Amino acid sequence: MSNNLLSVRSLKKRFGGLEAVNVDKFDLNKNEITSLIGPNGAGKTTFFDLITRFQNSDSGSISFDGKNVTSLNSYKLARLGMVRTFQLTRVFDRMSVYENMQFAGSSINNEGFLNSLIQSSSLKNQEKLLTEKINETLELLNLSEMKNAYARELSGGQKKLLELGRSLMKSPKILLLDEPLAGVNPKLSEQLLEIISNLNKNGINILMVEHNIDAVMKISERVVVMAEGKIISDGKPDFVRSDKNVIEAYLGSSDE
Amino acid sequence: MKKYIIAFFLLAISFMYIFLSNETGGARVFVNLMTFAGIYGLAAIGINVHFGWTGLLNFGHAAFMGIGAYTTVLLIPHSLGREGVVISSGLPLPIAILIGILAAALLGLLLGLPTLRLRGDYLAIVTIAAAEIFRLLVRDFENLTGGVYGIIQFSDSLQNSRPDFITRFSESYDISPAQFWVGVLTWISIIVILLILSRLKKSPWGRALRAVREDEDAVRALGKNAVLLKLQSFMLGAAIGGLSGIFLVFNYGTVQASTFVPVLTFYVWAALILGGVGSLGGPALGAVIFWVIIASTDSISRFLFESPDGQQLAGVRFVIVGLLIMFFMIFRPSGILGKKEELLLDVK
Ligand SMILES: Nc1ncnc2c1ncn2[C@@H]1O[C@H](COP(=O)(O)OP(=O)(O)O)[C@@H](O)[C@H]1O
Ligand SMILES: [Mg+2]
């Protein structure tokens, strides 16, 4: 295996007669913001599901951080540092914003049944130490005031922020964001983009699916275009913008 | 706070009702009711761990109660019903109870391993089926279980441990000492288990279960093993169910295939819904209210039928409990003690 952070080969997934994903080769190696775009139904979410192991691929291989993870459990892959968010936001509705963050940040060891029953002083200390990181992250995302609210009470945009905040508690190597700006108002979008680009400057790789083309072109160093399961274009934003494959794909699709 | 006051008044009125409607033997009726309530409450606490904490649908609690009960009873001296085969040797009771509880947890593991990886509905179906299979196996393996004739004469192991003051107290109030002892032990168990559970609920483990209840995929995305958490929760709730089943058969003094019918599971769920899904003390409170209602439905039966037989009594009970659950689902789905904001029975 190469020393790419993420490396995907001949990844295929069919749903009945539909070829949802058929990606020959996809590598991420530099710390940059990569955007994955393409018409609705192009297979972007399914591609995310496959590389994060939320769905099994029919064939192909995935390696992450030098390890072959083709058949690893999704939660184990997340422990290795690949953390994702979802197109349809998934927050823990009936837990407070703070508890959402606590759960994300607390160690697996402390969540062991026996350790939780015994509650040693080191467990209590570690839980207390979390507080600082949680408060910092909530501050960064402008969610401090909603700390004690139930997550279900947040607006759609705030839920996206919380999901991002939760992911940050894991100190990921790579963040996969599935439409982080969908349903977020323009002002908040602006903020979110800035946060994402700061995260990247702090060494977190970003791979995101996003429909907001202006935002994508502004923030990304690399843009990958998918259509009908395949990668049809890959390069700098300017290159992709003028690639005739891309223009055709978008014009040919009834969705956009 | 308000709901605790409501709960307090409900209880006070219920108890007054019991003593007023039974001029003689009020204490006996009260102890009978509280013992059953304790047993159902304990069972409901088990389901609450499953459903209230973790979102697991267990519709076969009777199987966990049953396996706990049968395992324990078969390990201590007992007689088989029909032919009266006497088995006079056995393990000390505390060890037998411990093994009974473990057996229930193991059944939880057995049912959970293949199903907890799948969507939630599978567990519901599998638990319903498992409870029926368990009951039929118990009925058909007559050599071991006594089948429909059941097992008798196992109570001594427990009653021998009854302190004198319990016996004297019972006699002076015309209470069944054997039942009183079962009742006392049941409520002590409830208190101990609730203390342990309140510790767990606030712990990182309890928080993780709630996260699983809310969204398993998000749990996975954050690097946590949702299946393991569900399995642990399922085994813990099953173990608590097992203990309640043990108390149930010591309360009856006998056990047969018909002790663990599906309606038992239904009634335990009813107690949980009345008390409040997800709340710590709700299930036990719900069970008390449930048994007060059961006691009063019997007087309704007597009003409807001149001298109601067992079937008529059971029928009226069933209808009234059903109506009551509907009433709660519509007007107070969070139960008496549940939090509105954490409503789990979202009737959309
Ligand atoms: N579970 C599934 N079963 C059948 N078809 C699916 C399933 N998931 C996605 N698809 C189909 O696969 C294609 C790709 O979907 P998706 O990955 O969600 O696209 P995108 O995220 O790019 O909009 C779509 O045509 C969609 O209808
Ligand atoms: Mg999508």
Image (cartoon, rainbow, N blue to C red):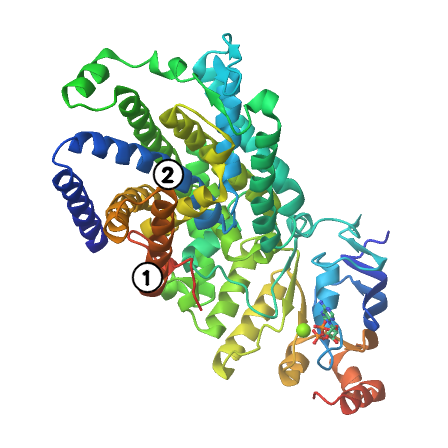
Q: Quadrant location of residue B132? A: top right
Disc 1: which residue: B327
Name the chain letter of the residue that bears numbered label 1. B
Outermost residue, bottom direction? A251
Q: Which residue is mark 2?
A: B40
Instruction: Give x and y (percent) for residue B294.
Output: 30, 45
Q: Is residue A108 visible?
A: no
N-terminal label among 1 and 2: 2
Q: At which x and y percent is residue B302?
A: 25, 47
Residue drawn at 65 percent across, 48 percent down: B117
Q: A205 and A233: which one is in front? A: A233
Q: Viewed as shown, does residue A173 lie left or right of B238?
A: right
Label 2 marks which chain's residue?
Answer: B
Q: Amino acid at mark 2?
A: Tyr
The quarter of the displayed image where residue A90 is located: bottom right
Q: Secondary structure at mark 1?
A: helix
Mark 1 → mark 2, Cα distance in angstroms: 21 Å
- The picture quadrant for ligand 1 comes to bottom right
**Is residue A63 shown above or below B50?**
below
Q: Residues within 10 Å of mark 2 (few under 14, many from 20)?
A: many
Q: Is residue A59 left or right of residue B51?
A: right
Which kind of residue does numbered mark 1 sit on?
Phe
Residue A96 spot, x, y in % from top left: 40, 58
Residue drawn 21% across and 24% down? Answer: B175
